[in-house]
Image: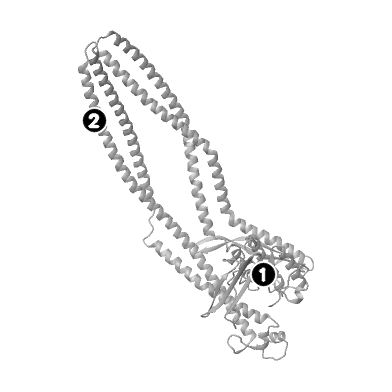
Amino acid sequence: MAVIGSDDVSIKGNTDSAKVELTLGKETYTRTLRRENGSVTTTGSPFVEDSMLFDLFAALLESNEVRQAVTRDADLREFIMRSIDTDEIDAEIDKCKNERERIEQELDQISSHEDELPELKKKRTQLENQIELKRSELDRKEEILEEKDANVEQTRKEKEMSEEKLEEIQNRRSDLEDVRYNLQTERETLENLRTEKSELQAKWESLPDAPEGEIERLETRIDRLRTKKQTIEPQINELQSIITFNEELLNAEDHEVLKTLTDNGDEDLTDQLTADKKVTCWTCGTTVETDQISATLDKLRTLSEQKVSHIQDIDTELDELSDQLRDLEKKKRERTDVTSRLATLDTEIEDSEERIERLEAQRDSLREEIDAIEAEVEKLKDESYSEILELHRETNQLEHEIGKLSGRLEQVEDDIADVKEQIEARPELEKQHATVQDELEDLRTRIERIECDAIDKFNDHMDRLLQILSYEKLDRIWLEQKEREVREGRRKVTKNEFHLHVVRSTEEGVTYEDTVDHLSESEREITGVVFALTGYLVHDVSEIVPFMLLDSLEAIDSQRIATLVDYLSNHCQFLVAALLPEDATALDVDHEQITAI
């Protein structure tokens, strides 16, 4: 356990350091433990940095939490789910939701543009018809103008001057049309900005501001609870170690220390214990009855359970406070984003209003220039040339209108091309949407699938082993998932838990449901090991650590131990089991024997 990376290890009391080395293939792993200032520090390069899954589901010593949980009939679901980072899953769910929302917005936009496509095509046809009509009219005007030019005598100078003025008028009118178009576009932009500001203002007013100091208060409370949890957890570990140590001394019939401490000479140790004989307490040195030590152990177990319950209460409050903190921080971010956008909109609105003022001034100036040039043209007119000048003006205007219509037609055709391109991209977006939706569904059901997988694996392996081990009158041990309503702070929530069922049969063959408390020690040990195997398989621990360690199986008879070892060896690369010599001789499988050095 030490060289793999577990911290649930110790060094002998008569030494200050210990070292272990493991060579696996071409790799070598080391771990050194040193006792310094009353505590043990570790150095070296262990097999894994995080040994939580190994400690829970592969280091199956008597003190293993999973085996102990079955003995206590605790909620087994907590052990299966302990390594699952639900906060990370929630963050991934939020990320998928945002991505899905982005894709859906793009798809909605494509659908909206697709709905506009018939109108765009209709507009294109209308513009093409208008251009055709304008060109026909221009052709007719130019024919008339050619006839008039042939019949009317005019000096070259007058004609050139007139044409220059007419061309200048045409240029000014073109500039004026551009300004009018830009002015209309800018007014639409201003209207959109004001609408967006109005909507954002309403959203800002609907977002409640967090009470002053509430986020800091929650963060402080969360930090305190985490610190408190970090303080209690070592106490629980220490209590468990004390309990386990004393249980081993009380329960081991041939324990050398207990023999030494017993006051009854050569009398059989089992007889001494059953007769409530006295021993010298190995903690305080006084002479006490073994029942008194057992009573003290019961108090320690109660204290340990109380501290575990306290940890659970802290976890519940931490979850509730973390949810509140995330909600407040999200609302704060939204409010900050809206405030920032409102400030930007104010600037954009002000800039747009200034551009409108400049365009209006430019428009008025161009109108004045056109009126002045037209007045100059009027001076060049005479009765014989007035009609020609009017025709020139009309042809220039038609050419200008045709140019504008052609520009609008080109823009409409670009819009149609953009819409078609977006429509072509829709299948890929829909594929991405389906992928994100599947990923979101996978995340949402991941915990449920792990729970179901754990129950299925436990029930399957438990059924197989009980059939092989042939426990008399024990028909089945199986897990069921149940929902239970619990209180978290001021609210009630529904949580899942694993409930262990025991089914027995009478000599008459009648089946009935028994309780975990009535399981024999052998049956409990088998159940605990099978549940640990369940976690080992569900979390693919073999991909992280190829070892499974097995110890303290004395409550199981030799033949069943051999069957259990054989069964477990099929599910891990290396199974290391500490067995008594008489139990080891019953093994049918080939095995290496590790001896003390």
Residue 302 seen in the current view? no
289 left or right, relative to 131: right
Choose the circle earlier in sequence order: 1 or 2.
2
Choose top left, top right, bottom left or bottom right for residue 56.
bottom right
Which residue sits furthest left? 379
- What residue sits right under mark 1 in the picture? 549
For label 2, the residue is 365
- Kindly identify the residue that appears in the image at 57 percent across and 81 percent down: 16
In the picture, measured across the screen, residue 358 lies left or right of residue 585, that is left
- Near-viewer residue (81 or 11): 11
Q: Residue 340 placed where, x, y %?
A: 36, 50
Q: Position of residue 120 (x, y in %)?
A: 45, 29
- Image coords of residue 155 (percent x, y): 23, 12
Quadrant of the image for the N terminus?
A: bottom right
Circle 1 Cα neighbour tier, 10 Å, few/some/many (<14 / 14–19 / ≥20) = some
Q: Nearer the viewer, residue 305 or 536?
A: 536
Q: Is residue 302 above or below residue 348?
A: below
* 147 vs 223, nearest the viewer: 147
Q: Secondary structure at mark 1?
A: strand
Look at the picture and state if 406 lies above or below 323.
above
Q: CA distance from mark 1 to mark 2?
A: 93 Å
Q: Residue furthest front?
A: 26
Evaluate whether residue 41 shows in this view.
yes
- Judged from the image, the secondary structure of the residue bearing numbered disc 2 is helix
Answer with left or right where residue 419 lies relative to residue 445: left
What amino acid is at disc 2? Answer: Ser
Q: Nearer the viewer, residue 292 or 219?
A: 219
264 is higher (above) or lower (below) than 582: below
Q: Residue at x 49, y 49 (%)?
A: 98
